[in-house]
Image (cartoon, rainbow, N blue to C red):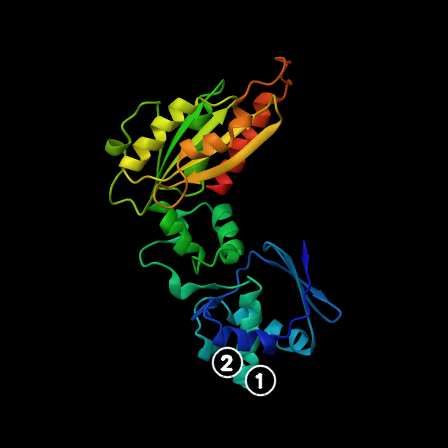
Amino acid sequence: MLAEKLISAEHMGRAVLFDPQFMMPQRPHFPKDFVVVPLKDGLLIEGAADQQVLRGKATKKLLPRLLPLLDGKHTLEEVAQAVPDASVKMVFNMIALLYTRGLLEDSAADPAGFEATSVDPQVLSYFRRHVDTTRVNHSALESLARLASAQVAVLAYGPSPDIAEEICTQLEQTGVGMVSALEWGADLGKLFEKQADRRLVVVLVEGQEDQELLQELDEQCARYALPWLRVGIDLKRRVAEMGPYFERGETACYRCFARANAEFAEEPDGTGDLQVGQHLEVRLWAQMLVLET
């Protein structure tokens, strides 16, 4: 998607200074994972959530000199000193523009002792290019370190219960530290480590869901203060639902959701033959679940 907005670097510089939602990187890093394409009047940058087009004189003359300096090793002051023919304000504004476009991470936020070599290169590249998606984390390594300290339990219900193992494998590949495929009825309190930074139960329901079973799970999660994510896949109705996310005290309980969602609990007229590709479709949605988790 092309994100070509007529917003000046000076305007974004002021926004970063005064808007508390922004936090200017202390050691800005422009990942080499981005593709930079020179244009007649600027640069096109590909690889983030949106394609970015930056135009103007400063983009043509100053930005190509700045990008190599934005390696995560230099502070803002050091970057400004490296281009003495440009004012500090001009350098700040240009870096602010890159930051607000989601093109910079802050290497100062990298946790000590967590090395990039411990992460799959493709996963690291993805996180570097999308760290701005939530602005909860300021660098890829910060977000990956949090993932490494997280614990996720996966339960699957339906014709393909083995898919829980596949989801676990993919979650591990994305960097989640502790992942388990559970049998229904397992004691979640014994499984989850209290010291885990983030804990989540993921439930994949294929076909019509057993509301009584999920209500029992919801109550158990509430007892242990565990949030859980419901994913429903019904190929007969051609419906896939990602959510809701349940966290007792913060969201509605499963019983309330099931009551409001009652129309989906009724059997459809006729059984009908499922498509030959149903196995692949379920796995497609399972992979989407991994991405969203």
Q: Is residue 257 above or below residue 100?
A: above
Residue at 54% of width from left, 69% of height from top? Answer: 68
Three-letter amino acid code at disc 1? Answer: Ala
Please say if the residues under marks 2 and 1 sit with CB atoms less than 8 Å apart.
Answer: yes
Residue 181 visible in the snapshot? no
Asked which secondary structure carries label 1, the reply is loop
Above or below 247: residue 78? below
Count of marks placed on residues: 2
Q: State the residue lying farthest toward the right.
A: 40
Q: Position of residue 126 (x, y in %)?
A: 52, 50
x then y, percent, for residue 178 = 33, 38
At mark 2, the secondary structure is: helix
Other residues around mark 1 within 10 Å, as few (<14) / some (14–19) / many (≥20): few
Residue 53 shown left or right of residue 25 in the figure: right
Pointer 1 residue: 86
User: Circle 2 sits on which residue?
Assistant: 80
The CA distance from mark 2 to mark 1 is 8 Å
Residue 157, percent from left and from top: 44, 22
Rendered residue at 51%/21% (across/down): 208
Residue toward you, 16 or 267: 267
Relative to the observer, which residue lies in front, 214 or 55? 214
Q: Residue at x 47, y 59 (%)?
A: 135
Asked whether, in this view, residue 198 is left or right of residue 274, the answer is left
Q: Answer above or below: position of 248 versus 98.
A: above
Can residue 158 be seen in the rendering of this structure? Answer: yes
Where is residue 58? Give x, y as percent: 65, 77
Going from N to C along the chain, the mark reached first, 2 or 1, is 2
Query: Could you tell whether 184 is left or right of 64 in the image?
Result: left
Q: Give the class, few, some or many, for how many residues have Cα within 10 Å of label 2's Cα (few <14, many ≥20).
A: many
Type of the residue with mark 2: Ala
